Image: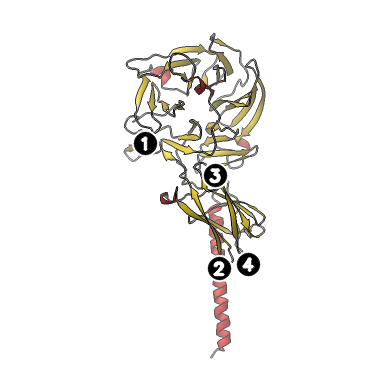
Amino acid sequence: MKNKNTVNHLADFIKSSRKILIGSLIVSAALILNSCVDFEEPAAIYDPSYPKTDDPVITGVAPAGIAMGGVREIRITGQNLGVKGSDTDWVFVGGVRAEIKEIIGTQTIVVYRPQLSEGNYGSQIQINVTAPNAIDTSANTEYMVESPGETVGNYGTNFSGNVFLAVDFDNQENIYIATGRAVWRNDPSGNTLAQMAGNFPRNPFESITDAKLGPGTPGINMYLACGIDIIYRVRVDTVQTGTVRPAAVDTLPGNVSKLDFDANGNIYSGGSAGVFLTTLSDGSTSQSLGYEGTTNIKGLRIVYEGTNGYIYVGDSLNIWRSQINSDGSLSGKEVLLNLSSIPGLSTYFISSFDIDENGSIYLCINHPTYKVFFRENETSVTPYYYDTGILPNTVNLLAWGTDRYLYLISSSLRQSGSTLYASERLYRMTQDKNGAAYQGRNFIP
């Protein structure tokens, strides 16, 4: 018969081994999951053998009080928030374990915003920081996370079979959608649909590549690029019936893909022959200002920093920036992004980009897991959210509306079997910052 103490020691050993085994399995599972994502930070290591530190304490959370729709990261400050080196406490937001981005000493942990259940958005939830060696001891604080966004309108009936070729917004957040051969206007909720102009000739208007509201009297004018050597203008201030043929604004040496306006209401356009400036007051067009040979242009944006104007030009792999001189010419060609040089993204392509008021760049990339990306700095492009369930995964166009609204656009209808449906074709995110101002809207009455 075995000694009672021996039995007790054996039982303790089995319990201890079981804890270590369970801890090891948890870590192994986390590492396997993280290895599937190109952009994930290395997972925190749970070390059950390391002595417990003092209990964690939360003293602050940023953004304070609430993480708005577009907030990507939540910063937690306090004491005893680190365990050892790269080992960290476990952080839960609304009961969901959050992926840790960065640990700063023992006083700060930065986590990526997790996906919450619908009932937890806009309601008081708990942020918990739990020490791995004492899972029954945690620091808690109340917090609120706003819904990341909302689907705007239902475009299944009126837009059956149509592709959203370009989208723009007026100063009241009305939504203008160019579908090819027509321009439609919705109110800010996506309803009250009206065909403002339509029955355009099939050639070239089935291939609209850009549509921007801009200057011109009377009323509101929309300027269209269609991938040919002409820019067109059409009235969209009243409902049009019958055949409406847009007026040709200018003829250019090459095919125009994208356009935007400067602060004086003049058009910068980009295409196969380079970037050109068209002065609307007299209809004159400059010689090429640069960017000759840039094919597959995916975006052209005029952005002002104080009184200095800059033009951002992007193709499927690159985004560049040049300064606009007082005479309208361009200086320099700064490389802001080269996708082919970024690990994990070198085999993919940019379909759209836009810029916020701070000069940060938002991108659509044809990645299989993520579609919306954010340029962190000169060398880092990361998914906007790491949690794949937060944003729609069919996005291929981006557009800032007015103020803090960023729209994610799925240009084509999606199909499930024989059923065609229009879920999340237009998805509106509320950001904690404004987009870079579109100068063309300054000329809308």
Q: Is residue 397 left or right of residue 375?
A: left
Local crowd size for mark 3, using a 10 Å CA cut-off: few (<14), some (14–19), many (≥20): some
Mark 2 or mark 3: name the one nearer the start of the chain. Answer: 2
**Which amino acid is tagged 2?**
Leu
| Residue with the mark numbered 1 | 422
Q: Which mark is residue 72?
A: 3
Q: How is the image coloured?
A: secondary structure
Mark 4 vs mark 1, CA separation in Å: 53 Å
Disc 2 is placed on an element classified as helix
- Residue 126: x and y in percent read 50, 56
Q: Residue at x 38, y 17 (%)?
A: 200
Local crowd size for mark 1, using a 10 Å CA cut-off: few (<14), some (14–19), many (≥20): some
| Residue with the mark numbered 4 | 52
**Which amino acid is tagged 4?**
Lys
**Which amino acid is tagged 3?**
Arg
Q: Residue furthest bottom?
A: 1
Mark 4 vs mark 2, CA separation in Å: 19 Å
| Residue with the mark numbered 2 | 21
